[in-house]
Image (cartoon, rainbow, N blue to C red):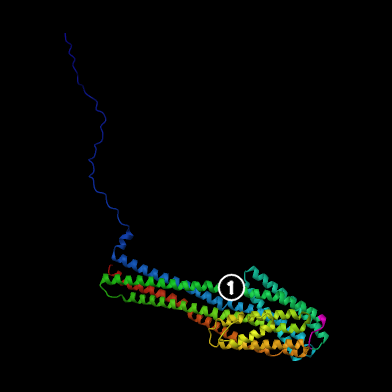
Amino acid sequence: MAVVTSTTTGPTTPGPTSAPVPPPAPVTAPRPASSPPRVQRLRTVPGRIRAGAGAAVLAVGLLFALMGVALGHAGDGLRAIGHTAGPQVVATADLYFALSDMDAQVATVLLTGEGGGPGRQAALNRYDQRRAQADSAVLQAADLAGGDPTGQMTVRAVLDGLGRYERLASRALLLDEQSRHAAGPPSQAALDVYRQATDLMRLDLLPKAYNLTLDSGTVVRHAYADESAAVLAGRFWVALGGALALAVLVALQAFLARRFRRTINPALLAATVVVGVLTIAGVLVLQRVSDDMRTAKEDGFDSVLVLSRARAIGNSLHGDESRYLLDPQRADTYEQVYLDKSQSVLYVPGGNLDKYYAAVDNSVAAFPGKADFLGFYGSEAGRITLPGQREALARVLTLYQKFQHGDRQMRQFATTGRSGDAVRQATGASFRAYDDALVELTKLHRLAFDDAVAEGDRALGGWNLLLSGAALAAALLILVGVRPRLAEYR
């Protein structure tokens, strides 16, 4: 029997139902990234006008900054050479002269003796003047030394040595006055004290004073080299900055003319003229100041310093003549020292004084056609640039030759026992005539120095206001020039 199985379908319990799925969104192409707002603005005409005007104003500002820096270097260079370090260096050179003349005057007083009369008193007065000059020069050297420890130490050493010298010189003069001797060597007591004084001066004070002058001259040379190079570099950058500003202004002018169908923009044209004139004037004034600095340094300062040294050493030569007669025991030493100093003033080949005298005669006779000598006067003869300089130097050399003739005659008197004639020759007028001619030559260079510094100061005068006013005017003209074009888009 077959079994039939039936399936009964009953009610079912409904299960959980899922949320209806939304239809898929339509696929669209990705949106291109939007341009930054600044780029959008630059793509518009007003944006380009503003950008061009801004670039032009920045170019004018750059030109203003470059010219300000260059003019600042020019002012610093003129100030250092003409108003601060330069005059102080000349003062330190005067220190050497004042010290050497102090010792020369003491020797003259001791040599003239009781019968010196007005000449003795004049030497004492001159000694007091040189002592005051030396004190002032030392103070100026201290200012110039500034923060240099070595320079300050040298200045202090000069001050200390000067005090010791003055005490020794005063004692020697007092002992000489008490001995009341005739013209010629003083008493042994006075001579012993003077030897200490002159050794201190020649071996300690004068070398230190000379080193101060050399160190001070280095300050001016460095200042000149640095500032002169900066001025010349500034001239180049000012020209380049001006060319850039002009190029930007011309480009802006061309854009406005092409876009707005206008031939010219008067305000921009005026700004271009202002920038062009400012650039040319700036380049010219920087060149002028550079030339004035060079003239002040090379034709003025360098020659004044060289001639100041020549005068100081020449004055020491005159003192060596007195010392030669004053101290017979050291006569050979003073004679050799005299020759060495003479060679530094005017160098010509000569192993002794007789050969030197002859060589000086030949060299002076050949000048100015031929300057076959070295030394300080050789340096001066090698750079004759000023009107009247050649004639003034020729006069100095001629009187220097006569001074050497007088020295030769003085030594001849001394070796033949004519001590009175030797003293009169040593204290005669030949050296004063030579010294006066040297002072006149130095004044020629001082005048050139002062004129160059004054011309440089005049060239820079008013540029602070002029530069600021011109830059501001150019910037305003640029803004005034683009404002009407921007107003057309409002």
Mark 1: few, some, or many residues within 10 Å (few <14, many ≥20)? some
Q: Which residue is mark 1?
A: 219
Identity of the residue drawn at 62% across and 88% down = 398
Q: Is residue 154 left or right of residue 288?
A: right
Nearer the observer, 396 or 444: 396
Identity of the residue drawn at 31% across and 57% down = 35
Image coords of residue 64 (percent x, y): 43, 72
Identity of the residue drawn at 67% across and 87% down = 403
Determine the image quadrant of residue 377.
bottom right
Residue 162 at least partly seen: no
Q: Which residues are magenta?
A: 183-189
Nearer the observer, 37 or 339: 339
Image coords of residue 320 (percent x, y): 72, 82
Determine the image quadrant of residue 47.
bottom left
- Identify whether 110 is placed above or below 248: below
Identity of the residue drawn at 59% across and 73% down = 218
Q: Is residue 11 left or right of residue 297?
A: left
